[in-house]
Image (cartoon, helix red, strand yellow):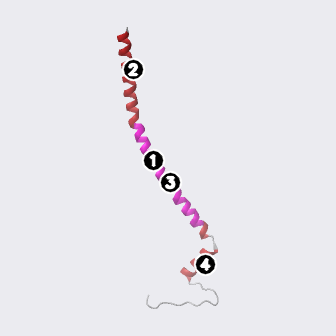
């Protein structure tokens, strides 16, 4: 009777060890994939925030003035423009 209990106990422990081992492999892969996805999400969030800040800046007078000066040569009254003839 005692021998039978030992055999059953060893069988049960062995069964759970095999089942646990089989579930441990995919779980480890899922953890690695989760970490990779979290990095991607963090990068996308940072990019989104940068774009939001850029969008916010593009609505300011400073940005509009900068673009007008750089692209269209806008100057304020009483300003002098000096050109470099070597460029």
Q: Is label 4 or label 3 in front?
A: 3
Q: CA distance from mark 1 to mark 3?
A: 11 Å
69 w.r.t. 1: above or below? below
Q: Which residue is mark 2?
A: 12
Q: Which mark is residue 42?
A: 3
Q: Position of residue 72 (x, y in %)?
A: 56, 82
Horizontal relation, residue 46 to residue 2: left or right = right
Q: Tell me which residue sits at (47%, 53%) in the image.
A: 40
Q: Is label 4 or label 2 in front?
A: 2
Q: Quadrant of residue 21?
A: top left
Residue range (magenta) = 26-55
Q: Is label 1 or label 4 in front?
A: 1
Q: Earlier in the sequence, mark 4 or mark 2?
A: 2
Q: CA distance from mark 4 to mark 3?
A: 33 Å
Q: Which mark is residue 65?
A: 4
Q: Is label 2 or label 3 in front?
A: 2
Q: Earlier in the sequence, mark 4 or mark 3?
A: 3
Q: Tell me which residue sits at (64%, 75%) in the image.
A: 61
83 w.r.t. 57: above or below? below
Q: Quadrant of residue 58?
A: bottom right
């Amino acid at each position: 009777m005692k021998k039978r209990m030992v055999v059953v106990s060893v069988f049960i422990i062995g069964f759970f060890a095999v089942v646990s081992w089989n579930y441990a492999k995919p779980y480890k892969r899922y953890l690695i994939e989760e970490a990779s996805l979290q990095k991607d999400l963090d990068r996308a969030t940072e990019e989104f925030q940068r774009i939001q800040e850029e969008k916010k800046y593009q609505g300011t007078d400073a940005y509009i003035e900068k673009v007008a000066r750089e692209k269209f040569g806008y100057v304020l009254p009483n300003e002098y423009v000096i050109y470099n003839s070597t460029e």
